[in-house]
Image: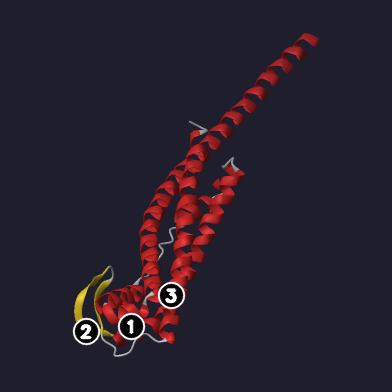
């Protein structure tokens, strides 16, 4: 009787252990599948960040050049008015027109976050850096909207002071020579100063973001490589 009971217990234990092991295998398969989805999503985020860096380099070039031209006007307004009205027209048109539209591609990041796959990322700093990156996108768009509004009065001033006759082209279109009989007023220079200051500030932010995005790509690749 005791021998039969012992055999029954052994058999039951084997069955239970088999079921538990089967559950464990299925759980590991499900976890591995989610890890694969997470890695696929992170790879797509890397591609998005690489595009962000490419766009940011273009945007940095625009705003740093615009800020440079603005400083030239502010440092030499009378000299340009007296001796080089074509260059003055070029600089004015550039400062007034230069601007960018930041393309905010958050779809893959939102998918990663909303699916719960973000919880599978082992590096807490990486999670925080991803959140930080996509939060500053909103700040970039806010800066651009502000500069667009700020440029309206500047554009109107420049439009009145430049010739319709084309002297050359800026990155954003043609420009004419400075034809106003009077030099730029303090009010005009103040408008230019505001736009120059914003472009300088924004160029600095963009430059910093390029470095941060490049480091973020390295951290994401490390996260992916841990399972490979």
Mark 3 lies on residue: 195
Give the percent coordinates (x, y) of residue 186. 44, 85
Instruction: For residue 93, say whether it is visible.
Output: yes
Q: Secondary structure at mark 2?
A: strand
177 w.r.t. 71: above or below:
below
Q: Residue furthest top?
A: 3
Q: Earlier in the sequence, mark 3 or mark 2?
A: 2
Residue that mark 1 sits on: 158
Q: Nearer the viewer, residue 187 or 30?
A: 187
Q: Which residue does the image show at 36% across and 85% down from the upper left?
A: 157
Disc 1 packing (10 Å; few <14; some 14–19; many ≥20): some
Mark 3 lies on a secondary structure that is: helix
Point 38% across, 56% down: residue: 57
Residue at mark 2 to residue at mark 1: CA–CA distance: 11 Å
Task: Provide the residue designation for mark 2.
Answer: 164
Residue 55, located in which quarter of the rendered image?
Answer: bottom left
**1 or 3: tag closer to the N-terminus:** 1
How is the protein colored in the picture? Answer: secondary structure
Q: Is residue 18 found left or right of 169 in the rendered image?
A: right
Q: Identify whether 8 is placed above or below 152.
A: above
Q: Quadrant of the N terminus?
A: top right
How much space separates mark 3 and mark 2, taking CA atoms? 23 Å
Horizontal side of 175 relative to 11 (left or right) equals left
Crowding near the residue tagged with mark 2, few <14, some 14–19, many ≥20 C-alpha atoms within 10 Å: some
Alpha-carbon span between mark 1 and mark 3: 13 Å
Q: Name the residue at the bottom extreme.
A: 181
Classed neighbour count for the residue bearing mark 3: other residues with Cα under 10 Å, few (<14), some (14–19), many (≥20): many
């Amino acid at each position: 009787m005791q021998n039969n009971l012992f055999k029954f217990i052994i058999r039951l234990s084997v069955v239970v252990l088999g079921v538990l092991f089967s559950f464990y295998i299925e759980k590991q398969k499900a976890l591995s599948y989610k890890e694969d989805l997470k890695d696929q999503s992170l790879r797509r985020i890397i591609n998005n960040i690489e595009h962000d860096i490419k766009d940011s380099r273009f945007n940095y070039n625009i705003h740093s050049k615009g800020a440079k031209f603005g400083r030239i006007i502010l440092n030499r307004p009378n000299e340009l008015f007296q001796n080089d009205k074509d260059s003055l027209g070029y600089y004015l048109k550039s400062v007034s027109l230069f601007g960018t539209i930041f393309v905010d591609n958050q779809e893959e990041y939102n998918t990663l976050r909303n699916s719960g796959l973000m919880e599978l990322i082992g590096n807490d700093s990486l999670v925080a850096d991803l959140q930080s990156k996509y939060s500053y996108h909103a700040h970039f768009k806010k800066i651009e909207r502000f500069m667009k509004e700020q440029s309206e009065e500047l554009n109107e001033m420049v439009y009145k002071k430049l010739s319709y006759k084309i002297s050359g082209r800026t990155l954003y279109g043609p420009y004419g020579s400075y034809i106003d009989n009077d030099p730029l007023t303090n009010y005009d220079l103040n408008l230019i100063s505001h736009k120059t200051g914003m472009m300088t500030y924004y160029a600095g932010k963009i430059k910093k973001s390029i470095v941060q995005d490049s480091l973020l790509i390295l951290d994401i690749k490390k996260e992916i490589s841990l399972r490979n």
